[in-house]
Amino acid sequence: MSAPPKSPGAPITDRRELVEYLEQGNKPADAWRIGTEHEKFAFRLGDNRPLPYEGEQGIGRILSEMATRYDWAPVKEGENIIALTKGQASITLEPGGQFELSGAPLSTIHQTCGEVSEHLAQVRAIGADLGIGMIGLGFNPKWKREDIPWMPKGRYRIMRDYMPKKGTMGLDMMTRTSTVQVNLDFSSEADMVKKFRVSLALQPIATALFANSPFKEGKPNGFQSLRSHVWTDTDPDRCGDLPFVFEDGFGFERYADHALGVPMYFVYRDGQYIDASGQDFRAFLRGELPALPGERPLITDWVDHLTTLFPEVRLKRFLEMRGADGGPWARLCALPALWVGLLYDTTALDAAWDLIKDWTEEERAQLRNNVPRLGLDTPFRKGTVLDLARQTVAISRNGLDNRARLAGMGDNESHFLDALQAIVDSGVSPATELLNKFNGEWGGDIDRVYAEYAY
C-alpha cells in the first residue's frame, strides 16, 4: 500500500513520493473511465485567418460567450480568460489559439461522443453569431508561423523562448498543430506496463489511420501527418517513443526517473509562472533550484512537470494516447473507441500484445520515423502498415463487442469504429482523401478545405 498522499501544500522531500503519485492512478476495472481531448483551429469566416486573442472575433470573446451562454466557469490569468471549467471538463487554449475540449472522465464511448457533439454544437452556435469557424486538421493548412497570434498564457512565453534551443520545429508544434487524444486507466503496475507497451508500439498505426495534415502554407507538404513529423524535432529530451518502456523492470519508478531527467520549463507560484527552463527537478528536490533557491517542490509542481513531457504515450495517473491528428466529428469519436477496444478488454489486450510482442526496438523506431511521411503505405516486414491497421481495428472491434456497453437503442460501442473501418477497407487515409480533392476538384485552392471540412 502507498502512503496516504500529502497535502498539496506540503513540500516533497523524498523521490519515493513522486513514484507514489503515479501509483495512485491504480483503479479497479469498474472505475476505469474515458477522457477524450480534442483541439481544433479557429478561423475567421471570409478570409480564413487565424484568430487573435483580443477583439470581437477573438478567442477571448469565444471563451466569454461560452461562459455566458453555457454556464462554463472562467479561469483567468491576470485579466484574461484563458480556460473554462464545468464539472470535470475544461476548455483550454493551445499557444496558437487551438481551441481544446478536455472532456470529463466518462464510462462509455456513447457518453464521450455525446459530449463531443454537445461541445461542437455550442461552438458552432457562437461561431455563427461571431463570423467564426473551426476545423479539425493535424497542421494548419494555410498560414505561416508568423501569421499565428500567440495566446496570453505565461507558461507559453517561457516555452516559446526555450523551444528553439532544443529543436527546429517546437514553435510549429505549439502554434500550428492540432490533435485528438484519449486518456485511459489501469488497475495495477503490471496492467499499466502492458497497456503502455501495447499502445506505444501501436501508436504509429493510429498515426497512419488518423493522418490528416498533408498541407503546409497552402500546398502539399510531402507528409501524411506533418503534425507527427513535427514532434521528431521539437525537443529530444521530452519527446519520442521511449524504448526503455520495453525493458525488463519497467514500471512507475522507471518512468519517474525518466521524468526527473527531463529539464524543467517553469514553476507556478502565486499566480505567476517562474522561468526554470533547462533546470533540474532533482536539484529542486534538494532545495537547490536556481529559480527558487531554498524551496522544495510541491506535488503540484510534479504534476505540472509531468505535463511538459511529450512522448507518443504519456503516463500521469492514467495513460494518454498522443499519436493522432485532429479530424472531423466521426474520428473524434473513433479515436477513443479504438483505444478503449484495445486496452479495456482483457482478450483484446492479449491479442494486441500478441501482435506487437516480437517487434524489435529498430522496427518500432522505423514505424515511428516512416509513418508520418508514408502513412498506411509504410513497409513493415512482408506487408505494410495498412495490414497492421486492419488487424488493429479488428482487435479493437472485438474488444468493444466484448465490453457490450449498450446505448438506448441497444447498439454497443463498436459502430464508432466505422470511420476507421472505411479507411482500412479502402486503403485511403484522410490525408490522401484531402490530397485527391486538392489536386482534383479543388484545383489547388486550399481555401476549399475550410469550406468543406469545418465543423
Image (cartoon, rainbow, N blue to C red):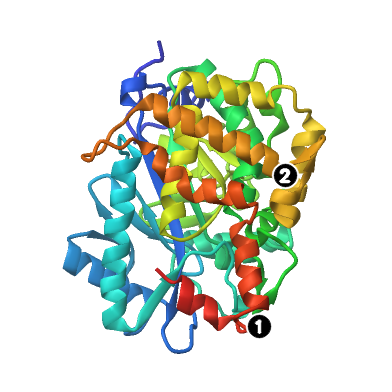
Residue 300 visible, this angle? yes
Q: Is residue 234 left or right of residue 401?
A: right
| Looking at the image, residue 275 lies above or below residue 296 | below
- Number of numbered discs present? 2
Q: Residues within 10 Å of mark 2 (few under 14, many from 20)?
A: many
Q: Are marks 1 and 2 in contact (CB under 8 Å)?
A: no
Query: Callout 2: helix, strand or loop?
Result: helix
Residue 370 picture location, percent across and down:
77, 49
**Pointer 1: what residue?**
444
- Which residue occupies 34% across, 73% down? 60
* Relative to 26, residue 56 above or below: below
Is residue 317 visible in this depiction of the protein? no
Q: Amino acid at mark 2?
A: Arg
> Which quadrant would residue 59 be assigned to in this image?
bottom left
Q: Is residue 62 above or below residue 404?
A: below
Residue at label 2? 368
